Image: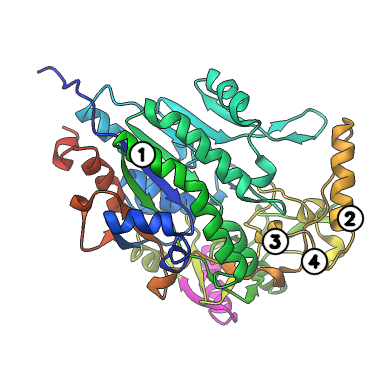
C-alpha cells in the first residue's frame, strides 16, 4: 500500500517557558489567543524543569521512559556530572515528528531552540552553540541545520545573542531573535517548534509577583505579537505550552555541604581550589532547581543518607526508587534518592565550605562545568560594586583577542527570588496550555498529552500514528 503524500495542517508549537495564569494577566495578545481558542492548566512532570518536561511533551512518555531525568545527571559510565548536553540521542523513544511523518511522510519540521536539538531528525534546526576558541575565549553563535541556514539567519538578524540568552545580561534580545527566526521558518514548515526563554529571567531574579516580572510579561507579549499575527494570517494552528511556573523562594538549601559535613562527599584540590570528587564520594547531589538527584555509591549506606536528608531543613520529600516510580521518574539515570524542596526552598550545588576554596568557575557563567544548576548566574554580584566594571574590562580584553575570565557571579544564593522544579501547589503559578483551535479542547492536559495535541492540531488521527 502506498503511503499518503498529503501535507498536514500547519502547526506552531510555542514553548513560552514560565507562562502561568499570573503572567497571562499582563499579556493581552496571548490572552486574546486563549479567548478565541481555549486555555487549560497543564499537569507537568517531576522534575518540572526544561529538559524533562520538553522530552515528555515530544515523546508523550514520562521520564522513566525517555530518560531525561533532569537538565543533567551523573553519567555513571563516565564518572562525570553533565548538565545541558545537547544531543537528541539522550532522549529515548519516538518523537512526535516521527508519528506525524507516518501519516504524512513529506511533512517538514523545524526546531528553533527546543532542547536536545543536536542530531534531531527534523528538516531545520536552530540552537545556541558558542564558538569555543582555542585560547579559551567564547563567542556567541548558533548551530543550524542545514548549514546554510546559519548565514541566512545571521545576515538577517545578526549573531545569536548568546550573552542575552543566559547570564547576568540575559534580556528580551534573545527571545526577540528566536521569534524573528521562527517567523522566517514558519511558512516553510508544517510543524514548527519554538522556545522563548524571557520569563525565566526576572521571575528567578526578583520573584513572580515583582514589578520586574510583570514588566517582563508585557515585554514578551509585545515580541510574540508579530509571530502570532503571522500564524493567523497563514492559517497555522497555534499550540502554546509552558513547562513550569516559577514560584517565590527565599530558602537556599546547601545539600552537598550537608553531605560533606557528614563525611559522605569528597573533594580533591588543585591550585588551591576544591573540586567535587564523584568517584570517591559515598554520596553527592546534582542540584537542579527544587529537585536534586542524590547518588549513593555504597548501597549499604543508603538508609544513613536518607535519614540525614530527611532531617535537613528545606527538604520536603526524599524519594527512593519506589517513591520515584510513583512520579514516573525511576530511570537508571536518576539518583538513588531524589529530593524535592519545600515550596519556598531550592537546592544549591555548592560543595565547598570556604569561599576562598571555591573553584574559579563558580564566579562565572559556566553551565557545562558546574556539577549542578546555578541561578546566581543571572546576577552581577550585588555585593561587589566593581562586578559590572570588571565585566566591561573583560569584554575589552576579549575584543583585543586576549584571554579573560568573567568573575562576576555571586557565591551568596540569597539574591535568588524565584525557582521551580516541584509540582505546583497553586494553579495560578502553574504551567498552562493554550490553543487557537477551540476544537482541541480537553478537560485536562498532562505534559504527555501535548504529543497527541500536536498530532490532532495537524489533522492526524492519533490511532493512525501507532507503529505496526
Q: Residue at x 47, y 42 (%)?
A: 114
Locate residue 446 relative to residue 145 in the image: left or right.
left
Residue 443 at what x, y percent from top left? 21, 63
Residue 444 location, quadrant: bottom left
Judge depth for marks 4 and 2 and give the one in front: 4
Judge depth for marks 3 and 2 and give the one in front: 3
The residue that disc 1 covers is: 231
Earlier residue among tags 3 and 1 = 1
Q: Give the range drawn in magenta.
A: 299-318
**Gap between marks 4 and 2, in whole Å?**
25 Å
The stretch drawn in magenta includes residue 304: yes
Locate residue 66 relative to residue 345 in the image: left or right.
left
Asked if the residue at tag 1 contacts the one at tag 2, i.e. Cβ–Cβ closer than 8 Å, the answer is no
Check the picture and name the quadrant holding the C terminus.
top left
**Gap between marks 1 and 4, in whole Å?**
42 Å
Tag 2 secondary structure: loop
Q: Residue at x 67, y 34 (%)?
A: 130
Check the picture and name the quadrant holding the N terminus.
top left
The residue that disc 4 covers is: 382
Residue 306 at what x, y percent from top left? 52, 74
The residue that disc 3 covers is: 376
At label 3, counting other C-alpha atoms closer than 10 Å, the crowd grade (few under 14, some 14-19, many 20 or more) is many
Earlier residue among tags 2 and 1 = 1
The residue that disc 2 covers is: 272
Q: Main secondary structure of the magenta part?
A: helix
In front: 180, or 255? 180
Q: Which residue is drawn at 84% across and 49% down?
A: 391
Amino acid at each position: 500500500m502506498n503511503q499518503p503524500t498529503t501535507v498536514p495542517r500547519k502547526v506552531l508549537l510555542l514553548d513560552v517557558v514560565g507562562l502561568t495564569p499570573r503572567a497571562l494577566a499582563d499579556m493581552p495578545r496571548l490572552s486574546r489567543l486563549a479567548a478565541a481558542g481555549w486555555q487549560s492548566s497543564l499537569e507537568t512532570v517531576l522534575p518540572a524543569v526544561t529538559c524533562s518536561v520538553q522530552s515528555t511533551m515530544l515523546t508523550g512518555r514520562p521520564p522513566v521512559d525517555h530518560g531525561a531525568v533532569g537538565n543533567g545527571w551523573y553519567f555513571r559510565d563516565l564518572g562525570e556530572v553533565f548538565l545541558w548536553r545537547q544531543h537528541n540521542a539522550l532522549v529515548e523513544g519516538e518523537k512526535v515528528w516521527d508519528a506525524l511523518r507516518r501519516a504524512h511522510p513529506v511533512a517538514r519540521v523545524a526546531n528553533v531552540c527546543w532542547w536536545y536539538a543536536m542530531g534531531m531528525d527534523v528538516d531545520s534546526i536552530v540552537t545556541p552553540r558558542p564558538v569555543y576558541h582555542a585560547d579559551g575565549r567564547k563567542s556567541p553563535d548558533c548551530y543550524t541545520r542545514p548549514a546554510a541556514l546559519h548565514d541566512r539567519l545571521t545576515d538577517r538578524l545578526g549573531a545569536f545573542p548568546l550573552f542575552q540568552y543566559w547570564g547576568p545580561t540575559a534580556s528580551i534580545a534573545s527571545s526577540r531573535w528566536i521569534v524573528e527566526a521562527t517567523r522566517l521558518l514558519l511558512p516553510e514548515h508544517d510543524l514548527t517548534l519554538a522556545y522563548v526563554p524571557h520569563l525565566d529571567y526576572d521571575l528567578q531574579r526578583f520573584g513572580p509577583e515583582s514589578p520586574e516580572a510583570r514588566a517582563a510579561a508585557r515585554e514578551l507579549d509585545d515580541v510574540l505579537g508579530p509571530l502570532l499575527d503571522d500564524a493567523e494570517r497563514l492559517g497555522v494552528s497555534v499550540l502554546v505550552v509552558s513547562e513550569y511556573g516559577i514560584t517565590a523562594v527565599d530558602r537556599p538549601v546547601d545539600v552537598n555541604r550537608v553531605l560533606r559535613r557528614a563525611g559522605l562527599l569528597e573533594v580533591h584540590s588543585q591550585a588551591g581550589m576544591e573540586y567535587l570528587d564523584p568517584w570517591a564520594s559515598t554520596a553527592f547531589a546534582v542540584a537542579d532547581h527544587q529537585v536534586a538527584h542524590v547518588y549513593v555509591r555504597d548501597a549499604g549506606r543508603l538508609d544513613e543518607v536518607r535519614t540525614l536528608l530527611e532531617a535537613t531543613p528545606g527538604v520536603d520529600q526524599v524519594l527512593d526508587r519506589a517513591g520515584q516510580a510513583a512520579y514516573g521518574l525511576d530511570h537508571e539515570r536518576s539518583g538513588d534518592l531524589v529530593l524535592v524542596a519545600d515550596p519556598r526552598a531550592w537546592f544549591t550545588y555548592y560543595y565547598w565550605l570556604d569561599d576562598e576554596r571555591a573553584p574559579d568557575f563558580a564566579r562565572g557563567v559556566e553551565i557545562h562545568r558546574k556539577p549542578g544548576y546555578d541561578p546566581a548566574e543571572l546576577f552581577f554580584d550585588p555585593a561587589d560594586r566593581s562586578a559590572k566594571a570588571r565585566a566591561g574590562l573583560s569584554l575589552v580584553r576579549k575584543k583585543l583577542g586576549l584571554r579573560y575570565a568573567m568573575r562576576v557571579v555571586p557565591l551568596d544564593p540569597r539574591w535568588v527570588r524565584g525557582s521551580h522544579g516541584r509540582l505546583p501547589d497553586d494553579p495560578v503559578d502553574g504551567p498552562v496550555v493554550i490553543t487557537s483551535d477551540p476544537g482541541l479542547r480537553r478537560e485536562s492536559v498532562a505534559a504527555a498529552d501535548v504529543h497527541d495535541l500536536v498530532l490532532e492540531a495537524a489533522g492526524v488521527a492519533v490511532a493512525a500514528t501507532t507503529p505496526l
